[in-house]
Amino acid sequence: MGREAYRIGIKLSGNPAKEDVIKAFERLDAKKTNEGEFSDITMEILFRTEGYLEILLNNPAEHEAARNKIAYETGEIKSIPTPTAFDKLIVFMRFAKPNSVGIVDKIISLIKQFKQMIPIDMVKDFEANIKIDLDNYADFRERVLQAKQEFEGWHPKVEYPIRCRDVYKVILQKEGVKSIETSVRLP
């Protein structure tokens, strides 16, 4: 699997307002960490001994519209096109593989509580590309454990709780790399 983050997603029933979804997560102790320039909202929850859960709320149509508006304002495009992307809020979640496997129970509990406030159609494990059964998730827990063990085979002793974005910073510091600078700039 290789990457530092394990990813899952929630498909919401209907089309709830983004503000309602944000309030539901805030009731579950999520803190808003960023409101992106493309209408994306990031939140996080710290499960004290298990690790961080990072949440991204994304509406592809809003994202596309915001991106087009910026492109119009900077002169990259002459007019703002009508968004063609899927117009429905999607909830993405991720957690760093070095975190405790106990985070699985916390996440499933959180999703069940969230489901009582905002109806959901399904929860998907993006790593395995299958649905997660909220009532019988032993297979999900096993996949997370396997991903953690595989990651730790390459990068042992990354302490948790840790955010996804901090994993490689910690690894590089342990290896004595002070900063990463790229000499090649990609288009």
Image (spheres, helix red, strand yellow):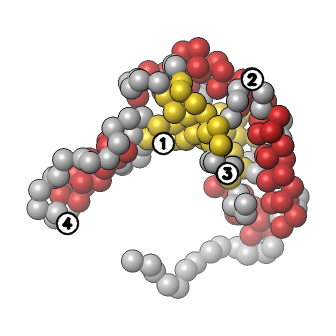
Name the disc covering residue 34, or none.
Answer: 1
Q: Amino acid at mark 4?
A: Glu
- Neighbour tally class for label 2: few under 14, some 14-19, many 20 plus, Cα within 10 Å: few
- Asked which quadrant contains residue 70, the reply is bottom left
Give the alpha-carbon distance from disc 2 to disc 3, as whole Å.
19 Å
Q: What's the residue at 70%, 57% (across, down)?
A: 4
Disc on the earlier residue, 4 or 3 = 4
Give the alpha-carbon distance from disc 1 to disc 4, as whole Å.
26 Å
- Neighbour tally class for label 3: few under 14, some 14-19, many 20 plus, Cα within 10 Å: some
Figure check: 24 above or below 144? above
Q: In the displayed image of the protein, which residue is found farthest to the front?
A: 130
- The quadrant of the image that shows the C terminus is bottom left
Q: Nearer the viewer, residue 76 or 3?
A: 3
Give the residue pinned by disc 2. Answer: 135
Marks 2, 1: nearer the viewer: 2
Figure check: 80 above or below 45? below
- In the displayed structure image, the side of residue 60 where residue 13 appears, left or right: right
Figure check: 140 above or below 174? above
Give the alpha-carbon distance from disc 2 to disc 1, as whole Å.
32 Å
- In the displayed structure image, the side of residue 27 where residue 102 appears, left or right: right
Give the residue pinned by disc 4. Answer: 76
